[in-house]
Image (cartoon, grey):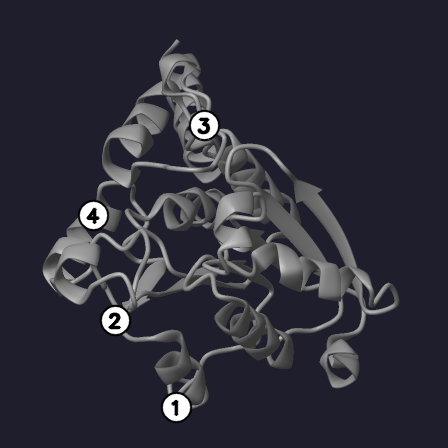
């Protein structure tokens, strides 16, 4: 009888270890926390029924691809960072580099930012923000502009980019710059999300150039594959077929 109890305890402990090693972070409580603290906007989300919208795509793509290095350019409250970071956490592999200078419309004006919230000024608050989701050891924030970040990429000792999320300045010039810099550090079958692929008014007034840049990429069929989700603000997923595709753009 004593041996039976001992074996049962060992089996229960093994089960607990298996469950902890094969976690799934997107339970109802976690999703509620994402809505409350990571505050998605423009991701086709529906708070009333805990539907993360594109957030499920971000999480699912990262779970399936198991990237070792993810780079996120820009985020108001960290929605994309959290969704991707939770996938890396559940994969138990990979790190995420988050780049945002923490501009805000009120402090820096409309010429520097549209949608910036000034969320990322205090390093300790940034760490606490991501600790809430258990990804503070996975996410590293760089409080700088995209050009400052990419010009010092090698100095930071960062590896190639397996998956990128581009959501910084949406002008055509900056979207092109961010994608090209990602491409220089990518490989065949690397992927990149381009957020706000469905904001027609901003495209018309030349406040955004995401749609225009996607049309450029679509013309290079041998270099890229693209799927666009034209709902809410929209998001496109680009697969790199030829990392040297930038040479012909």
Classed neighbour count for the residue bearing mark 2: other residues with Cα under 10 Å, few (<14), some (14–19), many (≥20): some
Crowdedness near tag 1: few (<14), some (14–19) or many (≥20) residues, C-alpha within 10 Å? few
How far apart marks 3 and 4 lie (CA) works out to 21 Å
Q: Nearer the viewer, residue 238 or 198?
A: 198
Tell which tag, 4 or 2, sits nearer the viewer: 2
Could you tell me how far apart the alpha carbons at marks 2 and 3 are, in whole angstroms?
Answer: 27 Å
In primary-sequence order, the first of circles 4 and 1 is 4
Instruction: State the residue at coordinates (72%, 80%).
Output: 246
Residue at 51% in and 48% down: 196
Secondary structure beneath dot 2 equals loop
Question: Mark 3 or mark 2, which is nearer the start of the sequence?
Answer: 3
Residue 221 to residue 160: above or below: above
Whether pointer 4 and pointer 2 mark residues with C-beta atoms closer than 8 Å, the reply is no
Locate residue 119 relative to residue 60 in the image: left or right: left
Instruction: Residue under label 4, please give it.
Output: 129
Q: Where is residue 99 in the image (x, y as percent from the top left)?
A: 35, 67
Tell which circle, 4 or 2, labels the residue nearer the N-terminal end.
4
Distance from the alpha carbon under mark 4 to that under mark 1? 26 Å
User: Taking 3 as reference, is 195 left or right?
Assistant: right
User: Circle 1 sits in a helix, a strand or a loop, which is it?
Assistant: loop
Q: Is mark 4 on a helix, strand or loop?
A: helix
Which residue, given by chain and number where applicable, does mark 2 sit on? 143
Q: Can residue 67 be seen in this view?
A: no
Measuring from the top left, give residue 135's x and y in whole percent: 32, 50
Characterize the local packing of mark 4: few (<14), some (14-19) or many (20 or more) Cα atoms within 10 angstroms.
many
Q: Mark 1 points at which residue?
A: 155
As measured in the structure, the alpha-carbon distance from the residue carrying label 1 to the one carrying label 3 is 37 Å
Residue 181 higher or lower than 6, as above or below: below
Write the residue at 61% across / 59% down. 192
Please identify the quarter of the rendering in which residue 229 is found.
top right
């Amino acid at each position: 009888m004593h041996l039976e109890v001992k074996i049962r305890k060992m089996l229960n402990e093994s089960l607990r270890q298996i469950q902890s090693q094969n976690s799934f972070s997107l339970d109802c409580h976690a999703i509620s926390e994402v809505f409350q603290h990571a505050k998605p906007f423009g991701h086709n989300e529906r708070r009333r029924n805990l539907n993360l919208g594109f957030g499920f795509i971000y999480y699912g793509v990262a779970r399936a691809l198991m990237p070792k290095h993810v780079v996120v350019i820009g985020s108001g409250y960290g929605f994309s960072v959290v969704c991707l970071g939770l996938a890396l956490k559940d994969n138990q592999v990979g790190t995420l580099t988050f780049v945002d200078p923490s501009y805000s419309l009120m402090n820096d004006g409309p010429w520097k930012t549209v949608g910036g919230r000034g969320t990322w000024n205090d390093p300790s608050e940034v760490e606490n923000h991501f600790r809430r989701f258990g990804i503070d050891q996975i996410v590293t924030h760089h409080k700088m502009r995209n050009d400052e970040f990419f010009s010092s990429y090698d100095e930071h000792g960062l590896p190639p980019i397996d998956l990128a999320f581009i959501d910084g300045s949406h002008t055509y010039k900056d979207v092109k710059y961010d994608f090209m810099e990602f491409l220089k550090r990518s490989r065949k079958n690397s992927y990149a999300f381009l957020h706000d692929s469905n904001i027609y008014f901003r495209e018309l007034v030349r406040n955004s150039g995401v749609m225009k840049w996607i049309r450029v990429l679509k013309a290079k069929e041998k270099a890229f594959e693209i799927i666009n989700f034209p709902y809410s603000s929209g998001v496109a997923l680009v697969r790199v077929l030829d990392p040297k595709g930038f040479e012909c753009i």
